Image (cartoon, grey):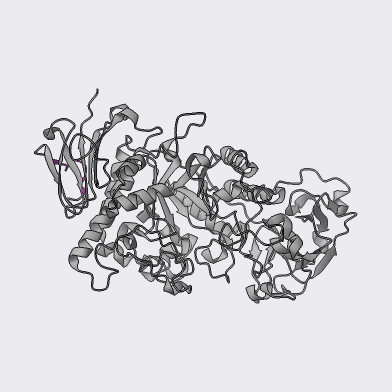
Amino acid sequence: MPDHLGRLQTVEAWEIVEGAPSPLGVTWVADNAAYNFALYSRHATAVTLLLYRSDDPRTPVFTYRFDPLVNKTGRIWHCWIPAAQAEGATLYGFRVDGPYQPTAGHRFDAQKILLDPFAPAVFFPPEYSRAAAERPGSTDGCAPLGVLPAADAAFDWGSDPRPRHTSDAIIYELHVRGFTARPNSGVSAARRGTFAGLIDKIPYLTELGVTIVELMPVHQYDPQEGNYWGYMTLHFFSPHHAYASGDARREFRDLVKAFHAAGIEVVMDVVYNHTSEGGEIGPTYSYRGIDNHSYYLLDDRGAYANDTGCGNVLRCAHPAVRAMILNSLRFWISEMHVDGFRFDLASIFTRNSDGTINLDDPPLISEISLVAAIGDVRTIAEAWDISSYQLGHSFPGLSWMQWNGKFRDDVRAFLKGDPGKVPDVMSRLYGSSDLFPDSGPDTYRPYQSVNFVTAHDGFCLYDLVAYNEKHNHANGHRNTDGSDDNRSWNCGWEGDDGAPEEVLALRRRQVKNFCCVLMLANGTPMFCAGDEFMHTQRGNNNPYNQDNDTTWLDWDRLERHRDVFRFFQRMIAFRKAHPSISRSHFWRNDVTWYGVDAEPDLAYDSRSLAYCLRGHRQHDVDLYVMINAYWADLPFTIQAGDAAEWRRVVDTSLPSPDDIVDPGAEALVETQQYTVGARSVVVLSRERRVG
């Protein structure tokens, strides 16, 4: 039995009769050949346990009605069931009765079969139905059920060396299914869209150079909800069943073990801020029917808060919810060996039980930080939601990394050619010390800034340079969904149909510019799977429900855009080879900022920037970077040393392979003045100088 929920270390005589209130969930007690069940519900008036065989998930083979005078301690209902009484059952669920008073926050319905939030795994019966869970009446035979623990074979982790990357950290966000779903992925039909399919692509990932894979949600989500991305979690203790051909838990472990052997960290995108039960008209699967008032954040009329935009908000300050989240994290750390978590809408964790915001000492953030420190794993926050923007030092997780939405917005606007962005881009390249200051009582480090231009949410990189407007009609919301603030530019032509060659060439250059700036910035870079070969979603910036070729990577584009892949690969290698770029501290006196001449041009109409980053403190070479976001060529005068000292590594205005050259093939810079092409980035290097 996994240790993530704890064990019954000792069994008291009365527990063999009454059950124990801890651990929550179901525990197999091998020495006694019995199951212990424990369920939190403060407001329930009656609880019934139902056991089923897998061949008949409608008719229970065993029923146990809890006696609150015997089977309840505090707010936890518990019972002890010897295996001999279980009649060969492998599945279980609960009926929970209590008041149905929506205005008071109570939505008990004894006709609904309920999934244990702490179940080891989820079983979906053949007649599983979300619609049945949404309407009044029974869900017998069509509700998701918990799986009773079994004595399965131990997983052989071997030595499992767990990688940890610092200045060479490159985060690559991908969707398990979308990465290999197409036949042209090179993955066999049986393994496409699965954890096993990702293992088959490890050689590609290592060739590209990524060192951290951030998996979009892999928690078990509702297969009938219509959310392809996976951000509508049903259950927090099991991998999504459709990402495996057999035992999902074992296949996920195989994936992690294989990634570790290749030196790649595995970070999970986790959604502990809401569930797939949605709002008032949503289904009753589990939390709503067990104790709606405890699990969800409600207003004084019992209506669901919706700061997540998904219909409900978990009541993250409540002890029961915190216990569920923390035990889930412990499970994925100890049992599945993951290396970190990216917390979707992590700002929700600062909500008090009444919905007010606590930025001083929210208990869940402190508790997650402790679990992460003990497990030695990363914590990455998306520090905003519909009602609260906490990016940077406002977010109370002092040691957490954070998705830097300001980096995305400022770099997009600057390279697009918007005015007034030079000072902002200087801050982003430097490591965003305005957001993550290293002075004052709380000291931040630049690597806490996860720098990105694209993520799953919004335009992919090619679409960022191919569309001015979103094209989300396929999502079924009349193009009203998805952000209208994209800071995109189509390079003079909307979409691909009929686009002139000069427009297509400019798009390639802009893609390389974005890659270049991302890889040159202090902090931790992240980009989306497929950006490296210009994957397109045809202008859809919110394809959350598009389980089709809109989101599935088209691997034919890798061959068509091999030069772009090469540029990404070489820029990643360049960043790794130069630890002076990504540091544990800010560049400070090692950087000098310039413009086309000696002083940086901070005027509103300026669209150019240069800087020299000296590498001697990091035992590295010096770098000279010139960025021209203007629509005409600009002559830059090299301000640091003589031209003959410098060698050209990158010039995005040049065709491949001269756009970025391999080590040893750098071109000599012949004159002090270097003309940087319109909308281009140039990087020079020279041997280390001291002083």
Measured from the top left, where is residue 108 in percent x and y?
77, 65
> Which residue is most to the right?
69
Q: Nearer the viewer, residue 102 or 374?
A: 102
Is residue 209 in sight in this rendering?
Answer: no
Q: Is residue 185 left or right of residue 4?
A: left
Quadrant assignment, res 560: bottom left
Q: How many marks?
A: 0
Residue 598 position, x and y percent, is 19, 34
Residue drawn at 80 percent across, 43 percent down: 10
Please identify the quarter of the rendering in which residue 81 is found.
Answer: bottom right
Name the spot of residue 144 as percent of width and height, x first. Answer: 67, 68
Q: Is residue 668 magenta?
A: yes
Q: Can residue 256 be seen by looking at this rendering?
A: yes
Q: Is residue 684 above or below residue 126?
A: above
Q: Does the magenta stretch mainly form a helix, a strand or a loop?
A: loop
Q: Which contiguous range is marked in magenta? A: 660-669
**Quadrant where the C terminus is found in the figure:** top left
From the viewer's perspective, is residue 85 above or below residue 207? below
Q: Is residue 80 left or right of residue 446?
A: right
Question: Would you say 489 lies left or right of 116 here?
Answer: left
Note whether 587 is above or below 526 in the view shown: above
